[in-house]
Amino acid sequence: MGEKRYDAPARAMKELLAVIDALIAPDGCPWDQEQTPRSMCDYLIEEAFELIEGIRSGDTREAMEELGDVMFILLFVATLYERDGAHTLEDSINYSAAKMIRRHPHVFGNKNFKNISELWDNWERTKRAENAMTGKKGMFDSLPTGLPPLLKAYRINSKAARNAFTWDSDEAVENQLKEEWQEWQEALDSGNQEESEREFGDYLFTLVELGRRKGIKANAALDFANQKFLGRFGKMEELAEMRRLTMSELSLEEMNSLWDEVKNWDES
């Protein structure tokens, strides 16, 4: 019964690997033949963002398609590494499985944790031991340098909190946030652009931590706000077109009026 659960995905992956082999074969596609793991990085980022968009939109069909595209890029890169003799897809999969088993002794072993906090403590200890073996000894050495800043701030605050280096209460964070706001205002008043930027960064960093404590991921929250604005603006453009108005010729007051109409529709 358990084996059947993996049969269909295994066959599908085998077929996709066969497609990739054909693409990079001597009589395959010239473009695919020229690719390297490094050259595929931008495509991987693009496909990952498209997958995220599909997931957050709630469109399961789009998420399915984009997940397939990400899988293709990952298998393509793995095949390129294997072709160059660096390592195989099997190596990567076995490494990941072993790591997850090692980091979940409460699932795959006889370890018991009283609460989530103990579980995270064990996770961090295991990660530190793993990182030490690869020369990464600092608490944040394993953080990818290319993470988007808001996501990186969330990860930094989360990791610091799991290692007991954080404010002792939400109220303390709120007070710190007020302090950072005041320092930013003072920097703005001074006219020093660099100082203003630094203080704004401090404010954002603290705001991300307050959100984290409230169960909010800043990156996802901001993405939601972006999509809400774009959606409403698109409806404004449609409304203007229906009324034979040209957006670029409207005054701010007229655009605000359209915005309020759309907002009322959304909230009704």
Image (cartoon, helix red, strand yellow):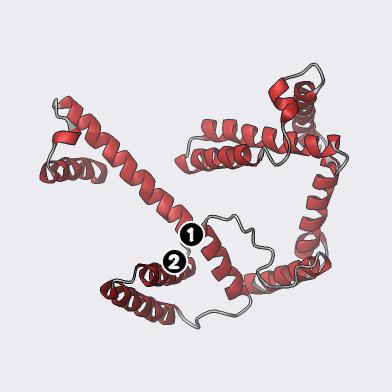
Q: Point out residue 42 in the picture as x, y percentages from the top left corner.
A: 60, 40
Marks 2 & 1, CB-CB < 8 Å contact: yes
The image shows residue 140, relative to residue 170, as above or below, that is above
Q: Point out residue 19 in the picture as x, y percentages from the top left corner.
A: 75, 23
Horizontally, residue 176 falls left or right of residue 91, namely: left
Q: Amino acid at mark 2?
A: Gly
Q: Quadrant of residue 263?
A: top left
Secondary structure under tag 2 reads helix
The image shows residue 61, relative to residue 229, as above or below, that is above
Horizontally, residue 217 falls left or right of residue 8, namely: left
- Cα separation, mark 2 vs mark 1, equals 7 Å
As drawn, the residue found furthest toward the top would be: 27
Q: Which residue is mark 1?
A: 217
The image shows residue 134, relative to residue 260, as above or below, that is below
Quadrant, the C terminus: top left
Instruction: Name the disc covering residue 236, or none.
Output: none
Q: Amino acid at mark 1?
A: Lys
Which residue is painted at 39% across and 68% down in the image? 194
Nearest the camera: 250 or 75? 250
Tally the numbered discs: 2
Which residue is painted at 58% across and 34% down in the image? 66
Nearest the camera: 197 or 119? 197
Which residue is painted at 48% across and 35% down in the image? 59
User: Closer to the N terminus: mark 2 or mark 1?
Assistant: 2
Q: Quadrant of residue 254?
A: top left
Instruction: Name the disc covering residue 211, or none.
Output: 2
